[in-house]
Image (tube, rainbow, N blue to C red):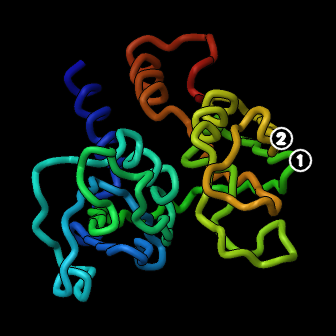
Amino acid sequence: MLAIKLTILALLAAAWAPAITGLRVDIACPGVNNELRCPEGSKIDIRYINHGSQSTKICAARNKRARTPRMNCFQPRLQTWFKLICDKTQHCRLPKPNARMFKSNCGDPKTQFIQVHYNCHKNRADVYNAVACEGRDAQMKCDKGCIKVIKAYFGRHDETTCNNTPTKMTFCTSYTADAYVRKTCNKTKVCNIKAVAKTLGNPQNCDALPKYLNVDYVCQVSRINNVLWMFLQRVKPLDVPCNNCGC
């Protein structure tokens, strides 16, 4: 049993992708967007955000960590929103600091900068991608294993996908799309999701141009179930299939 536990721990450790660099910082002063970037082949992971009063020195060095007060004046869901937009992407642009991001009793938001702390993690090599323009179906399928959604968004992350009129209203998404796609598709072999706001939710901070659904997923085989199955077969061979080894 100890050997099984050690094997499971080793598999879990292998699945964790360490940061390829140290913690990165991006500062956006009033009138400027936060722009987060990772090297080719890696993805963003926002760790935390904070804010402070702008100064010429701070605004001129947006990649250098700035001191901030302990007081948190952000609206409660702001970091969740930032993570929905940026996490598991190579590059993202966030909205400029504005009054809607801050609580009303925290002074003038027009003087505040936003500081985002994030890591870059190596991409998995086995990720599949499904894209569907608004009104169409995103189709996911696993011949081996079962679907595990890495990230899903319904909105717009670039200027031209599913759109003949380039727009700068990008990096906008629905709050609920990711959770809906995960709930619907995880642990299935085939999954089709229609790209409509009725089920995925209305994208926030988008314009009226067409949106699209983008899903990154992997086909996951339960390694732990396989390890346990092989161990049991060694101890006492069984003439029954491993029903849970696929997912």
Of label 1 and label 2, which has the lower sequence position? 1
Asked whether residue 37 is in view, the answer is no
Quick one: SS at disc 2?
strand
The tally of labels here is: 2
Q: Which residue is mark 1?
A: 135
Reply above or below: 40 against 47.
below
For the point 83% across and 66% down, the residue is 162
Residue 138 in the figure: left or right of residue 17? right
> 105 left or right of 45?
left
Give the Cα distance between marks 1 and 2.
6 Å
Residue tagged by mark 2? 194
Q: Amino acid at mark 1?
A: Gly
Measuring from the top left, give residue 101's x and y in whole percent: 40, 52
Q: Are marks 1 and 2 in contact (CB under 8 Å)?
A: yes
Q: Quadrant of the N terminus?
A: top left
Type of residue at label 2? Answer: Lys
When asked about the image quadrant of residue 32, the answer is bottom left
Q: Quadrant of the C terminus?
A: top right
Using a 10 Å C-alpha cutoff, classify the residue at mark 1 as few (fewer than 14 neighbours), some (14 to 19) or many (20 or more): some
Q: Taking the image as drawn, is residue 238 in sight?
A: yes
